[in-house]
Amino acid sequence: MSRPHAWLELQAWGALAVPTGLLAGGVVGVLINTTFVSGISDWNLAIATALVTGAGPLANVFSAVWSKWSEGREKVAALTLLKALFTTCLFIIPLAPINHIGLFILVVAVLGAQIFWAGIVTIRAIVWRANYSRTARTTFAAQTQIIVSIVMSLVGAAAGLALDLNVNNFRWVFFGSAVFSLLGVLSFKRVRVRRQKQLLAAEKKARDNRIFRLGNVFQVLRDDVIYRKYLLWQFIFGSGNLMTIAPLILVLTYNMEVPKLTQILITASVPTILMPATTPFWASALATRHVVAFRALNSRVFVLASATVFFGGIFQSLWLLWVSAVLIGVAFGGGMLIWNLGHNDFAPQERNVEYMSVHVTLTGIRGLIAPLIGVGFYGLLESYKPGTGPWALSLPFVLTLCGSCGFHWLYHTIK
């Protein structure tokens, strides 16, 4: 049963990689700064860029909500509904006029699409666990990630080329992505979930016997001192990472006047395609290390990448920024791995969901505030003295460095 379902799913997720490649923070951020540049203030553009670049992490806040919503529902039907809503958001984007109202519509549509995508990814994990054995699931997830990363990288590059030819091409680009999304929905509708009746019955029984309270989630922070310290340094460290892209797009657009294709390759396509290539190395490193020890190791690459972004920005060196794109891809190859698995080294089995919920909620909070602080700092520097905006990249570098030092300190404390 697994083989035909895996083929259907590969088709579906491959098609859906087209719109997710466009919704990647670097791609849609460049789109906004390219298309809406006339008639809209730089400050409004900067805020919009910050919101769309942080939309993906921000949407993680809703993961627990989607998990709760899906309990007792047929999984394919629930996923089809969310994908339909996701596709609707994509069809709205090409209709946005080039003015303040259009910018608002675009930002809301991107936020909506990312929120629905968070639900899709959350429920997808339940389907994969039901349909595939542990070994098959790992292999299938790896294959899917490779295909999705390649498609997302190519789509981002194609979008940059289209914008360089004509800024109004964004309408056709997003309309085409919505069509691919629709094809993905139709392909996935034929998937079936193994033993779904037993799964739904177990979910309904567990739901009836469990009372969900938000306070239970944050009780984790009071009970587990080490996990609380880990999340503190993760918040500082992750804020630096999430703060980088938005001001970097502003630097590439206004200070360096780099072509759109180059901007998207540096901020999105190159890191995306390198992530799955480096994940096997990081997986072998994680297999023999506690999450804190792994974070200390992985954070060194992030610090090097952030330093390269900073110096590339202040010296307006394009080759340094190309190097930073490679380093970011290598770093996130381990970063995404540990983001999904790290809480397991702290959580008792019966509290796994609570530990993960705290983690994703804090990710969503920094996904909202970190990009806004980054572009705000850029605007403050430019208003003080034009041309000094690239120094805003010093703030994410400092935060990343402090977070890395915190991971090393915590590792030596608990070793």
Image: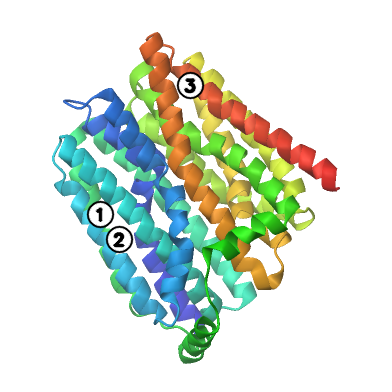
Residue at (52% x, 80% y) in the render: 131
Q: Are the residues at dot 3 and dot 1 in contact (C-beta closer than 8 Å)?
A: no
State the residue in front, 23 or 142: 23
Residue at (32% x, 55% y) in the render: 113
Mark 2 surroundings: few (<14), some (14-19) or many (≥20) residues within 10 A: many
**Does dot 3 land on a helix, a strand or a loop?**
helix
250 over 235 or under it: above or below: above
Residue at (31% x, 49% y) in the render: 110
**Label whose residue precedes the other's in the sequence (3 or 1):** 1
State the residue in front, 259 or 237: 237
**Residue with the mark numbered 2:** 86
**Does dot 1 land on a helix, a strand or a loop?**
helix
Apparent side of residue 178 relative to residue 290 in the rendered image (left or right) = left
**Label whose residue precedes the other's in the sequence (2 or 3):** 2
Q: Are the residues at dot 1 and dot 2 in contact (C-beta closer than 8 Å)?
A: yes
Visible in this render: residue 107?
A: yes
Residue 30's label in the rendered image is none
Q: Position of residue 371 (x, y in %)?
A: 44, 35
**Residue with the mark numbered 1:** 90
Apparent side of residue 316 relative to residue 44 in the rendered image (left or right) = right
Residue 392's label in the rendered image is 3
Q: Position of residue 310 (x, y in %)?
A: 54, 22
Question: CA gap, disc 2 to disc 3?
Answer: 34 Å
Question: CA gap, disc 3 to disc 1?
Answer: 32 Å
Residue at (64% x, 53% y) in the render: 338
393 over 12 or under it: above or below: above
